[in-house]
Image: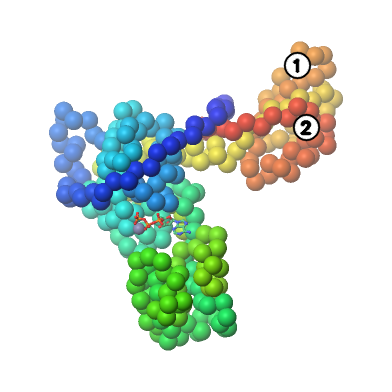
Amino acid sequence: MVLCVVPDIYKGLPHGKPLSFKTRPVKQDIKNNDIPMKLRIAIQKSGRLYEDSVQLLKECGIDLRNVKDRLKTESDNFPLEIFFLRDDDIPQYVEDGVADIGIVGENVLYEKNKKAVIVEKLGFGKCRLSVAIPRSQQYEGVQSLQGKRIATSYPYLVNEFLAKNNIQAEIHEISGSVEIAPGIGLADVVADLVSSGSTLLMNGLKEVETLLQSQAVLIRNNDLNAEQQKLVDKLVFRIRSVKKAKHNKYILLNAPNDKVQEIIALLPGMKSPTVLPLAEQGWSSVHSVLSEDTFWDIIEQLKAAGAQGILVVPIEKMII
Ligand code: ATP
Ligand code: ZN
């Protein structure tokens, strides 16, 4: 069965102050039988991952009250407490068990080199960590970085990359606006996050090496108890349903009965397409699910095969 509901649009951005937590051992929570166990998730307080993280939780059917300007909130309909933090701090909190799970970019997770398990890739916050050099300079492979000054906010990952390639270079760690470093004489090259590449272009730089492809991931503490793990599994089940739905579209079309066989041969469907008779004699309605990857190709073929009145509807959740 496929659920077709037009997705909600969510609003609101927090502008809270940094949150400080005392480390508390994970297992203490479940000892008190009076308090039902809650899973604690750390998400970014504000920035590029905030909106997608909150939206994902909402799409998973988790009601979040007062997310605006809050450092911490909880859900009314899922045993979940949400901590809003700087993304850099999330791996540490998850390793320590202050938060049981977290949403963070792979770039930050690997840079911080903390112990946490990746549970699910989330498909947003996509970017890459790249080395970029002034556009006027020649690049003849990684050896061109020998002896250079590299400005970056990712010293651990850059150091790893240099060591792997036997390059001696000077790493200058800076926390923001890395791309201006060559222009102001602070460094020769940069290693920074890139998504479209327009920031590099604007600063007269060109990308020459990719160190890491990154996206937002759900991470969990290494040592969850069975009850916590059960809640994580429940959340992951919902996340997968939401992700799957985003990747697919529900399609409805009308076709003359003599064309139906040809049309359903083009449609994969979840099991097989649904075919229903129309009130008008000799006509049927065909329903199916199409993946976004093949969507436009198949639509063209359907039209050519005689499909009419094609409707395409977003799917909110797909439970398979
Ligand atoms: P915080 O205040 O939480 O420390 P920040 O300034 O370090 O925030 P953002 O710029 O909000 O971080 O980016 C958060 C994450 O978004 C990055 O760590 C990365 O995983 C992802 N991201 C996706 N595209 C980009 C991009 N073009 N530049 C920077 N980060 C990106
Ligand atoms: Zn950060």
- Quadrant of the displayed image that contains ligand 2: bottom left
Where is mark 2, residue-wise? Answer: 263
Residue extending farthest to the bottom is 147
Q: The disc labelled 2 sits on which kind of residue?
A: Ile
- Residue 42 in sight in this render: no
Q: Is residue 51 left or right of residue 6?
A: left
**C-alpha span from label 1 to label 2:** 16 Å
- Which class describes the residues within 10 Å of circle 1: few (<14), some (14-19), or many (20+)? some
Q: Identify the residue position indicated by label 1 in the image.
A: 278
With 287 as the anchor, is 130 left or right in this view? left
> How far across and how far down the image is residue 125, in percent?
47, 52
As drawn, 228 above or below 255: below
Q: Residue furthest front?
A: 184
Q: Amino acid at mark 1?
A: Leu
Q: Quadrant of residue 234?
A: top left
Relative depth, front residue between 88 and 110: 88
